[in-house]
Image: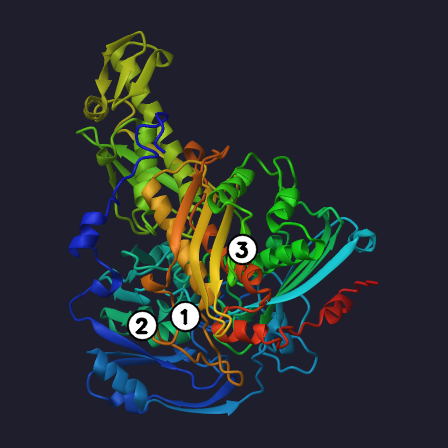
Amino acid sequence: MTTTQFKVLERNHPRVDAHDKVTGRAAYASDVYLPGMLACKLLPSARNHARITRLDTSKAAALPGVRCVITGTDFPDIRYGSGALRDRYVMPREVVNFVGEPIAAVAADDEATAQEAIELIEVEYEDLPSVVNPLAAMGDNAATVHPEVENYEGYGFTLGHNVSTLLDADRGDVEQAFKDADVVVEDVYRSQGINQGFLEPMACVADVEPNGRLVIYASTQGPYQIRAGLAAVLEIPVSRIRVVAMELGGGFGAKLRLAFEAFPALLAMKTGRPVKLVNTREEVFTMNGPRLPVTNYIRSGVMRDGTITAREAYTIFDVGAYLGAGPNSGIGHGIGAYRVPNFRLRSYGVYTNKIYVGSYRASGVADMTFAVESHMDHIAHELGIDPFDLRVHNALREGDVSVSGAVVPTNGLMETLEAIREKMDWPRDLEDGHGLGLALCEWRSGSGPSTAAISVNDDGTVSLLTGSTDISGSDTSLAAIAAEALGIPMESVIVAKRDTDMAPYTGQSGGSRVVYSQGTAVFRAAQDTIHKLTALASERLGVPEDALGSEDGRIYVLDNEPQGLTFAQLAAASITSRGGPIIGTASLSSMPYTPVFAAQAAEVKVDRGTGQVKVLRYVQAQDVGVAINPMAVEGQLDGGVVQGIGRALTEDQQFDPDTGAVRNPSFASYLMPLAIDLPEMEIVLVNVPAPDGPFGARAVAEPPGFGPPAAIANAVYDAVGVRVKELPLSGERVLAALQGEDQDIPFDVETLRRAEGIVTD
């Protein structure tokens, strides 16, 4: 509901780029056409682990229309990394590590010629031992993906033998707490591989200016990160690279880091001509990192009244051939949104010979939420306690200490639960085959380097410049924050397009950081702008600054409101003032811990004869702090739930069990939900302002996708009495459970404990 507290915020605003988008004027990377531009195509590896013994490009290079062919040896001998370790070459020099890894690139006059040249390249391999299953990869006798991993630069190698990283968190006396518990509940859950499903394929254009500077027109969520990555793998200074972030046709984390930009970049440097690369959909599935399967072991010690006293969780993240966004987001979420005084959490990133892992909306947290929230229901039914009441009993409260050690500030967690209770009329009896399921989601508002600049124009409008790429309408939210802080209408804020030469450095557009962190920078830049306008008005009016106020685009005398100057008048006067033109700036590197809580519930119908699950209704309540632009917030919440329903029921990036190759590289076989598949969805916006967010706003986008797998799985149990512990909840899998087939997922937790010297009773 709109309040009277704000003039701009908490009101619906169309996207600032809406006109360009609906008229087709918005320019994406694939829309860039430069004189003399060449087309780039890539040659994928046909092996998942092999030494390249022969790579003959002579026939391809001799084909008329081909201008250049490059392989791994054309790049500097430098390893880089998307995660904690520098474990990869931008293109393999000797050894390939997954089916689909690009091993050569061609630049030709047109795409057809480039593709023909790719097919003329001759490759011979010497196969090496490989491993595809992450649990098997941790065994002593498994093939080693990276034999030289201990020599890689980065944060360091942890346990050895395909374990790329180990993150841990410990508190209290875990073993004693388990001994003292009335009941111990133990589960293993497995979530599947997931593709981000963005509609715009990866695309970029590389050009070399007459002065030798490299210019990249990219579909990216992180232009500065692309610039840094290119500088590393091409061995050129960042000052010689300019990245222009084009309109973004979806990313969901997949476009945060360097992907294919180095290939057209090097080809452009070698040919002196612009080079464009646009992936096919199959290349998107087989070359650019998805999320890979995750296995979660979880054990809890609980008292008869439902109090959780101990938690042990081991998570195995399959990171594929190279460490990207692996276990980094998952570790703290083994607790969930609950008070657990004693815990031991371990999160392993394990190499396999599959496509490398990428980011997808809070990488790993949805997997952890499925396990934790399914486990919470298991505990509730084991104790004979209503699942809702169990969550309320154990939920975090203000003043509790989070897994990271941060104190939980004021929040709307309990309000989200109560909203679900009211909307779902929980508990209530349903007919046979129908069930209700609940999930509680926990996340945090993202932080990271953020900058903003606001300049006041001669007509009283302002130009807002940030380094954040617009994803999901974030420019509109930033404009609304600037307008509210400056006291001007939304239409008076012009959001400038940006590139790395123009805009101040900022972090990636991802990780729930743009509105919270970047929005705070915009708010502070607006405050700086007001301060400078007030100082100039004080000089011109002969009135002390503390006697002046700001409202409706003017600075006025507090005890004589008609006396004042408009922003336009002050902008004109600033040109000849001692301080010069009015430009407000702000920058920050981090923000305080601000949690985001959401409660979600599903009502489902299960067909006992086929196992098919139909979601009839889905309700979510999320603490958004303050809804900067309500219709954009609701769009994000709806979109996240749709992604979560796909993860719960149909989406499954499948891999060949022997080679790790992607088996369903298209939207025809990777089944995302369609409009006809979706239930009635309801949203409740809970408004408990964050202490540090801009005007109290919290992050929004990522938590909506966390809850559906668990909420739907819990509803299936409520409907038909079987708990399916592996995603997706396909008809075949649910039917197998109904027919009594074994649902156990193998997990050797004792070996992991012994590796760390942990002794349990």
Name the residue at the top extreme: 559
Q: How far is the residue under mark 1 from the one under mark 3?
A: 34 Å
Which residue is pictured at 30% across the width and 55% down the height?
245
Q: Which residue is mark 2?
A: 279
Relative to 85, is 6 on the left or the right?
left
Q: Which residue is mark 3?
A: 437
Name the residue at the front extreme: 431
Q: In the rendered image, which quarter contains the C terminus?
A: bottom right
Task: Give the residue type that dot 3 points to.
Answer: Gly
Task: Give the residue type that dot 1 points to.
Answer: Asn
Task: Give the residue type that dot 2 points to.
Answer: Asn
Quadrant location of residue 453? top left
The reply to whether discs 2 and 3 touch (Cβ–Cβ < 8 Å) is no
Relative to 36, is 746 on the left or the right?
right
The reply to whether discs 1 and 3 touch (Cβ–Cβ < 8 Å) is no
Q: Decide which of 230, 310 is in the foreground and name it.
A: 310
Residue 288 - label: 1
Q: Is residue 190 visible?
A: yes
Residue 633 - label: none
The reply to whether discs 1 and 2 touch (Cβ–Cβ < 8 Å) is yes
Tell me: residue 234, above or below residue 714.
Answer: below
Q: How far is the residue under mark 2 from the one under mark 3?
A: 40 Å
Tell me: residue 561, above or below residue 73.
Answer: above
Tell me: residue 427, above or below residue 271.
Answer: above
- Disc 3 packing (10 Å; few <14; some 14–19; many ≥20): many
Q: Whole-percent x and y of residue 432?
A: 52, 62
Q: Whole-percent x and y of residue 485?
A: 34, 29
Instruction: Give the structural element (helix, strand or loop) at label 3.
Output: strand
Q: Decide which of 608, 545 is in the foreground and name it.
A: 608
For the residues carrying marks 1 and 3, which lies nearer the camera in this image?
A: 3
Q: Whole-percent x and y of residue 685?
A: 42, 40
Instruction: Give the structural element (helix, strand or loop) at label 2.
Output: loop
